[in-house]
Image (tube, coloured by chain):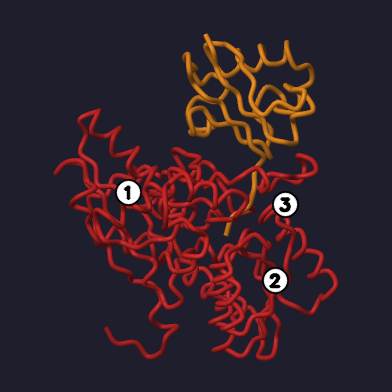
Amino acid sequence: MRHDSLLDSVGNTPLVGLPRLSPSPDVRLWAKLEDQNPTGSIKDRAALAMIFRAEKEGLLRPGCTILEPTSGNTGISLAMAARLRGYRMVCVMPENTSEERKQLLRMWGSEIISSPAAGGSNEAVRVAKEVAADHPDWVMLYQYGNPANAQAHYEGTGPEILADLPDVTHFVAGLGTTGTLMGVGRFFREHKPEVRMVAAEPRYGELVYGLRNLDEGFVPELYDETLIDARFSVGPRDAVRRVRELIDSEGIFAGISTGAILHAALAQAAKSVKAGERADICFIVCDGGWKYLSTGAYEGTVDEAEEALDGQLWA
Amino acid sequence: MAIEVRVPTILRTYTGGEKAVQTSGGTLAEAIDALEADHTGLRDRLLDDGQVRKFINVYVNDEDVRFSGGMQTPLSDGDTVVILPAVAGG
């Protein structure tokens, strides 16, 4: 397919069936391959939408500095687009993220401010807000509260799924900024309200939940719980097991968070089989496994991988 | 009837430093009442006006109770309740 530039090629990702992992001809799983976006993750959609909106509103002009708290993918997407459109990029990223993510950010020209491992992305958000206060001329697009993040999925991801899979019954995605589920959720609530929205939330090691007090907890401003129907917490053991199953059975090499999403999708598939219902379950492959090779998730026993991931922000 | 409750670091001052404690009850509300009897003060940290606090998530067998019956979520022997502070992703 021909595009005028790389930025024009974001979205319209393939939807592929999973004939081996689907439990029966009546209960089928479908993977939306978001790793096939330009920087290799679903975040290209949100990053571009946020930049385009900020340009349209006059917030971003050539030479501006963009600041963003990120655990990796959003920063990588923003850095690529920032380079092409003439902005300086500064990411605030927790130090317990994989080395590949840091290298990729630097490669696309981003500067990195490290935030403490304890507290995970909550700390990155807190530090970024402090940095923003010190640099009022910098533009923080703020993926957790920027409506353009969810809108990208309302206008792109959702309609693409409905066009490719008109009989879709369930949509399963990860819950980070909540942008994917909020946008796709709102699209289906309006266009096919019977589609059930299922969230898979990564459950990290204790370090990541090491807040000083509960008021430091964080719920993204975008989050509207009426747009989802079920929410599962998935630990590293299940995520690793599923990500390896996806490679072994279907040949798809995905990142660890996709393992967590597949775990929730397979749980839904089992429920549908038990209830004797037809189901076409679409889930998101957020990114490929490349950025996580150094975490140890893809080698050795599942026990070893689980231990290696403890304390890391693996999604 | 034994229910295991996993407690985040930040609330272990109420459980004498224990990561996981046992409780009982046929619903989440009953289990939290039973928990309060052994670990005074914990209920107030979890609930506000009878509902789970905004920055707390409670899961029964990995499913968020806000979508599976709230405080009336049924519990059976061997179920696991996980309590976690809300954290960001992305």
Q: Are marks 2 and 1 in contact (CB under 8 Å)?
A: no
Task: Specify whether disc 1 shares its chain with disc 3.
Answer: yes
Residue at 68% across, 62% down: A94
> Left or right: A126 with respect to A262?
right
Callout 1 crowding tier (Cα within 10 Å): few <14, some 14–19, many ≥20: some
In terms of secondary structure, where does tag 1 sit?
A: loop
Image quadrant of residue B10?
top right
The residue that label 1 is drawn on is A192
Using residue A22 as the reference point, say whether residue A216 is left or right of it. right
Q: Nearer the viewer, mark 2 or mark 1?
A: 2
Local crowd size for mark 3, using a 10 Å CA cut-off: few (<14), some (14–19), many (≥20):
many
For chain A, the rendered hue is red
Q: Earlier in the sequence, mark 1 or mark 3?
A: 3
- Residue drawn where x is 26% and y is 34% of the image: A272
Q: Which mark is residue B10?
A: none
Q: Quadrant of residue A7?
A: bottom left
Q: Amino acid at mark 3?
A: Ala
Q: Which mark is residue A118?
A: 3
Quadrant where the N terminus of chain A is found in the figure:
bottom left
Q: Nearer the viewer, residue A290 or A131?
A: A290
Residue A300 screen position, x and y as percent: 42, 53
Q: Find residue A246 and report its horizontal and vertical position in percent.
A: 31, 54
User: Is residue A163 placed above or below A122 in the rendered structure?
Assistant: below
Query: Upstream in the sequence, badge 2 or badge 1?
Result: 2
